[in-house]
Image: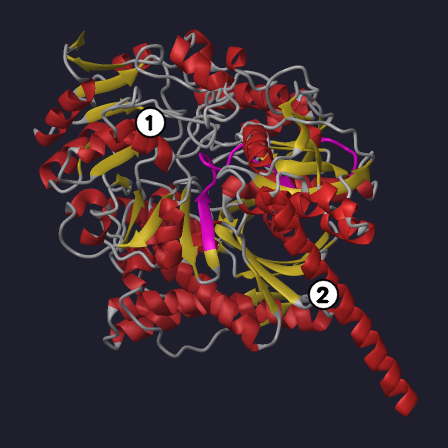
Amino acid sequence: MRATRLGSQSRRRRRFSRIARRSTSALTMTRYFTAGRTPREALLAQGERTIARYTFPPMRRLRILVEGTVQGVGFRPFVYRIAVRHRIAGFVRNLGEAGVEIEAEAEPHVLSAFLSALKEEKPPLAEIAEIHIEELPPQGDTDFKILPSRDGGEGAGLIPPDTATCDLCLADMGRPGSRFYGYWATSCTDCGPRFSVVEALPYDRPRTAFRDFPMCPDCERDYRNPLDRRYHAQTIACPRCGPKLSFISGGQEIPGDPISLAQEALREGKILAIKGLGGTHLACDATREEVVAELRRRLGRPAQPFALMAREDQIPLFADPNEKEWELLRSPRRPIVVLLRKPGYLAPGIAPGLHTVGVMLPYTGLHHLLLSGLPFPLVMTSANFPGRPMLIENDRILRELSHVADVFLLHNRRIVARCDDSVVRVGPGGPVFLRRSRGWVPEPISLDLGPEAILALGGDLNVTFAIYSRGKIFLSQHIGNTEELETLEFLEEAVRHFLRLLGIPRPKWIACDLHPGFPTRRLAEEWGEAIPIQHHVAHVAGLAGEHGVEELVGIAMDGYGYGLDGTAWGGEVILWRRGEFRRVGHLRPVPMPGADLAALRPGRMAASFLFASGLPVEEAGLPEEERKIVQTQLQRNLNAPWSTSAGRFLDAVAAWLGICSERTYEGEPAMKLEALAAEGKPLPLEIPIRSEGGVYVLDTVEIFRALWKERKAGAPVADLAATTQWALALGLARIALEVAKREGIETIGLTGGAAVNAALTQAIKEEVERHGLRFLAHRKIPPGDGGLSFGQIVQASYLLRAKFLP
């Protein structure tokens, strides 16, 4: 024991001696600095070679490969700046899709600080997925360089999304001494247009819309300076050399400052068409009801909610965003965020019958300049006609919006790729996409689905397409309604553009919806080997793929999907395992009198549920003549296809309660029902579930009959609306729980268009988690048809790998 203690003391004395010698060396080093000698000379002169090695570690060289969104976002000049700051030698260069390559030579502690800065100070638009490091022999370099890209151009293998003007550029725009003072198209490597202006790869100026604007000497100087944040900023421009604005009234360009003229017109209550980043908006004063009503009249949109654009100081006047909502509003992606609306201030016609309003902050220099001089927020709604692509050419904007807009604020920069605003809502589990477009597209979602490239074309309405290649799924911008010929042509054009950007041929395998009449299915059959995927199976597969799970019980709630039996599905519980699936539950089928007309006239669905319940059809609220036609259709089963749609059930209740008698935009009855339900509380109700041949059925007719009884007993309509949502959610959740228990599955997910309803999601989430199971909801893709193409790719990949296809 004593020997051990003495040994320990001896080791401690030797260690303290070494520390003392190091301290002495540091002091000696300082003295020799003052004597004009280098520290190394001083230490070697004293024979302290060990201490010299400790104080001056050998140079090391690292090869650093950075993967992710690191091209076209100012990553190379960022690396150059931090390398110069840390006095590191070596180089940086782009490797196309392989990422960015860095070779860095310095002392170990300097390299460590450099790597920390690389991760912690990255540009706002950069996303680092992985960093691979290997050690190389030192080469004795003395400076740091930016080498030409291996792809032969200045830029990227992948294009980043369009993003909001950064704070530094806004500061340049607001500083009188800056050459960017008051210039609407100011941008740098950290912000501005990307996807909407790129024609082809590699990403450099001659392959963008900015090739029409040769750089002036000042912009050229900034572009060539690695220490400037506009180094190789392909969209650099200033008033001398960049795009110009014009203000048009009465078909003539009006002399003067275009932004001041536009502000004056808005103050006068006029409707302004604004050509922006990825399309055209219509703007007007959001606080004046007569102006908003006139815009509705001219557009023929009697009730569709208008999005707003407002400054930060204006938003608290009509909404109280929570912390997460503010984070989304202020993010560089700048989506429209759906907020709970406070009464007053805004014109009532902004979002008739809804308790929410969609808001975005200014995201371009043009928007900031326009809003800065206005005392009110603006309606900022897409100028396209329903289901059709946005207008992007100046002559068409002037011609086709002449009966809608009083005045026009246009620019002469071409829009290469249309891109609608993204729309996000914060739900019970976090943000949910209503639309994934500007700010996210064309950013890929990483998912390894095997070697086969796949193209998916989505459904019929709210279409997006998706491309799978080399472990990534690229989801397109919002396309629209492909029943419109112009939109179908836009889809074809957008697919070709994406394939050019990705540098791949059109895939052989093309996933599409099962519906035989959809234009997207016909296009898939023309273009290659079509893989038809059932609508709700695609939704469930997309949810599984997004979360990386290989089995789950999926609840799919939406308005319509062509079923395997040829009927209209829409309230489904699907057991899904690695591409194999089984329909294990659904809502009770009811007729849709008039087929698609029943979706436009929700009173027809109310009549259907009343008829099935043995209740007076007269309570459906239909005009007498229409009621008689509908009653005949129901009695004789004429043009009344069967449906299990959750959307049609919600529509029926909305019409029966007098909330919405006619659908003027997608989802209107259900959205108005949700708004009313937010004011009520669910009533206790028995949830009627039965089993038919091993498949569970939620009896929505019995639920409707129970609601009818409660109404006759005097229940408030808000409580009836809340009860409708609660009973639907709880019934489908209980079916899913029973199936999960039987099959030994621990995960239940919610998908489909109705999954954006916060109350439905909350009720299902609580019921699932109360039973100890994992609940999944969409976070990366929209739960509705905007995410359908993603799910089609996931399902098709499993079919291909399992060789279910020829």
| Residue 565 seen in the current view | no
Residue 224: give x, y in percent of width and height: 51, 16
Q: What's the magenta bit mostly, secondary-structure-wise?
A: loop
Q: Residue 20, labelled with which disc? A: 2
- In the image, taking residue 334 as reference, residue 251 lies left or right, namely left
Q: Residues under labels 1 and 2: Cα distance? A: 80 Å
Q: Amino acid at mark 1?
A: Phe
Stretch of the chain drawn in magenta: 431-454
If the image is split into quadrants, where does the C terminus sit?
top right
Camera-side residue: 295 or 365?
365
Q: Residue 174, labelled with which disc? A: none
Q: Residue 385, labelled with which disc? A: 1
Query: For residue 433: magenta?
Result: yes
Question: Disc 1 or disc 2, which is closer to the eye?
Answer: 2
What count of labels does the image hold?
2
| Residue beneath the point at 55% across and 27% down | 72
